[in-house]
Amino acid sequence: MNNPFHISGTYTDQYQLTMAQAYFERGSGNETAVFDYLFRKLPFGGGYAVFAGLENLLEALEQLRFDAAASEFLSERGFTPEFIRYLKNFRFKGSIYSAAEGDVVFPVQPVLRVEGTVMEAQIIETLLLNILNFQTLIATKASRMRQVAGDRTLLDFGMRRAHGAAAHHASRAALIGGFDATSNVQAGISFDIPISGTMAHAYIQSFDDELSAFRHFAKTWPANCTLLVDTYSTLKSGIPNAIKIAGEMENSGHRLSGIRLDSGDLAYLAKQSRQMLDDAGLHYVKIFASNQLDEFVIRSLLEQKAPIDGFGVGTNLVTGQPDAALDGVYKLAMAYGKSRIKLSENMAKITLPGKKQVHRMYDTNRRLIGADVVALWEEKDLQEMHHPYYDHKSMGLKDCTGEPLLHPVMENGKRTRPPMSVTEIAAFSKSKVDGLPEEYKRFDNPHIYKVGLSKALKDERDQLIKNMKK
């Protein structure tokens, strides 16, 4: 993996380091701790999320260092010489248990667990949240678009509208969620993913006439030529000129790959363009559309039977509109050998204590029953699960079998297996999303996938709540 962005130990919030120094001076920094990564709400009003960013996180943790520049910077801001010496030798030596990247995940359940010293687990919090929250958001958005696009081509065109360097990881997450390629060349290099692009209006405007612009572009890219047809007039100029160029390309032994619509009534223009192309015998020329697309616009276009073969999606993909952020959190579950809990007036914000496993439940025919159980790590026999917030709600699990979701991916600061490629993760994610029943994938009022607690975990949580309130 060729990542151009170096991540220093200072890629964090200041309070992670102020807490770390306090642990250090107390002499408790090497005590063990367990933290859980989870989120509380599904994005986009949907029924599932696609977990993404794990491989980037593991790579970053293996390389995480505080260099001389970081030491000097922190020294000037009041951190003690003794603590800075500790940071100079800092290496993440903890263990991570995680769901597989690309799997479907749900609120409440731990998606990833960090075990290590309390200092190292605290230092990596911001980095972890920054990578996993963003990529999970974008992969989920991409997956929603794939659901409506079917087997049509989906291209990430979002780099110019992304939030700075976030474009890099957005392109990766988009491919995991089901996109076919990205316009982001650097992401193509870093993650070995396909790149794709056509032309801009400026190229056409730089010529004295549209036909000359098309002709020169086709001569440059005869094997992969897609013409942007809406610079002046799609139906009166762009398509007629594209048809002329297609004829010239056929005469030279090549074929026009496609045309792209980037403005106007895309459904109407696609239908008219298809008719004009077909009348000219150009049934093979594909139609691509772009311009402020999202899953709802794509669905609408296809409901209107717009003959569009592929979509270029930008802003709404890479900025995760309309949500713009996943509310993932990183919460302490154990410290100094004891289970820990955070209380809140809002029951949904009370944390789950202890070391836990998540079990995905299947019926006797290996079909998903639409429920995951969060249990204590050592639990095996799961007979029932309880609602995380409402005491009177429970669900029997007789004749069901559970499949554990959290597996070791890092031990002693080193990955336990070779990295997976984006292509491999995307294929795995597709299998998981395809296996999810349709009622969880619909956009309007999706069925709620149940996440419950084992009786033992619920009892431990309830007892800790009582103890803390005394």
Image (cartoon, rainbow, N blue to C red):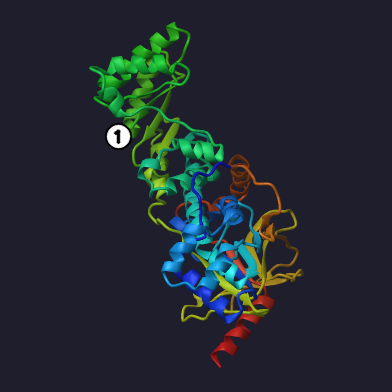
Instruction: Give x and y (percent) for residue 351.
Output: 56, 75
Q: Amino acid at mark 1?
A: Asp
Q: Residue at x 60, y 61 (%)?
A: 111
Q: Is residue 11 visible?
A: no
Q: Residue at x 42, y 35 (%)?
A: 311
Tell which residue pokes out farthest to the bottom in this image.
Answer: 470
Quarter holding residue 353:
bottom right
Tell which residue pokes out farthest to the top in this image.
Answer: 251
| Rendered view: 278 above or below 111 | above
Q: Is residue 157 visible?
A: yes
341 relative to 252 in the view: left or right:
right
| Rendered view: 398 above or below 167 | below
Quarter holding residue 449:
bottom right
Judge the density around disc 1: few (<14), some (14-19), many (≥20) Cα neighbours within 10 Å: few
Instruction: Give x and y (percent) for residue 156.
Output: 44, 39
| Rendered view: 326 above or below 251 | below
315 relative to 180 in the view: left or right:
left
- Closer to the camera in the image, 370 or 324: 324
Instruction: Give x and y (percent) for residue 319.
Output: 40, 50
Q: Secondary structure at mark 1?
A: loop
- Closer to the camera in the image, 133 or 140: 133
Residue identifier under label 1: 265
Instruction: Give x and y (percent) for residue 265.
Output: 30, 34
Quadrant where the image shows the N terminus: top right
Quadrant where the image shows the C terminus: bottom right
Q: Residue at x 29, y 15 (%)?
A: 211
399 relative to 46 in the view: left or right:
right
